[in-house]
Image: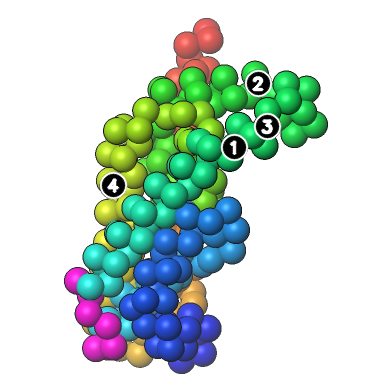
Amino acid sequence: MHFPLTPFLKTAGYIGFFGAAFAESGFLVGFLFPGDSLLFTAGFLSSQGFFSLPLIIGLGISGAFAGDITGYWFGKFVGPKLFRRKDSRFFHQYYLARAQAFYERHGGKALVFARFMPIVRTFVPILAGVAKMHYPTFLLYNGIGAFLWAAGIPILGFFLGSTIPGVEYYLIPLVLSVISLSMVPAIVHLLLEKKKRRDRAF
């Protein structure tokens, strides 16, 4: 196979997999990590007997959950310091108030849908911390999102790896398809919300 994540996962093993799943949400530069591809490839390797699928799922959920918690507290304690000045070039108190209102109304859905959107999933928990989203609510939806993402994508990789002969030759297009399809629910939800707001305006 000529897929770059495969040698990485085979070399880094379970610890590297957990670290990558954590870093994508736990560090500000986590958007550089290919989260969906990582999960799918780990699931595929599980179908080939290289990993244990239950262990991959457990580590993925744990890493994603812990990563978002880290991102939340980073945003809560560091974010306001970064944007303290009202007339800052990069931030205004008005935006923080809007972010707070947004997370009070849609914070749970944002956390779940963001799991399936590359780049976005890195910043959503940080912004939740900046906006001081209700922490028990954050934990609940963080857990739901982590479970759906870190269980669903490896299971899909395992299933396809177990049922399609020679699937390793189609791994890259399959991963790209999974990334595209995983964004569909969030896009549909955003379009429906936009339509509802437009209908209310009239």
User: Is disc 1 in contact with disc 3, using a CB cutoff of under 8 Å?
Assistant: yes
Under mark 1, the amino acid is Gly
Q: Which residues are magenta?
A: 48-54
Say which mark, if any, is on residue 186: none
Residue pointed to by mark 4: 143
Dominant secondary structure of the residues highlighted in magenta in the image: loop
Q: Residue at x 65, y 21 (%)?
A: 93
Is 166 on the left or on the right of 94, as rendered?
left
Q: Is residue 143 magenta?
A: no
Is 197 on the left or on the right of 47, as rendered?
right
Say which mark, if any, is on residue 79: 1
Under mark 4, the amino acid is Gly
* Neighbours of disc 1 within 10 Å: few (<14), some (14-19), many (20+): some
Q: Is 72 placed above or below 38 here? A: above
Nearer-N-terminus badge (2/1)? 1
* Neighbours of disc 4 within 10 Å: few (<14), some (14-19), many (20+): many
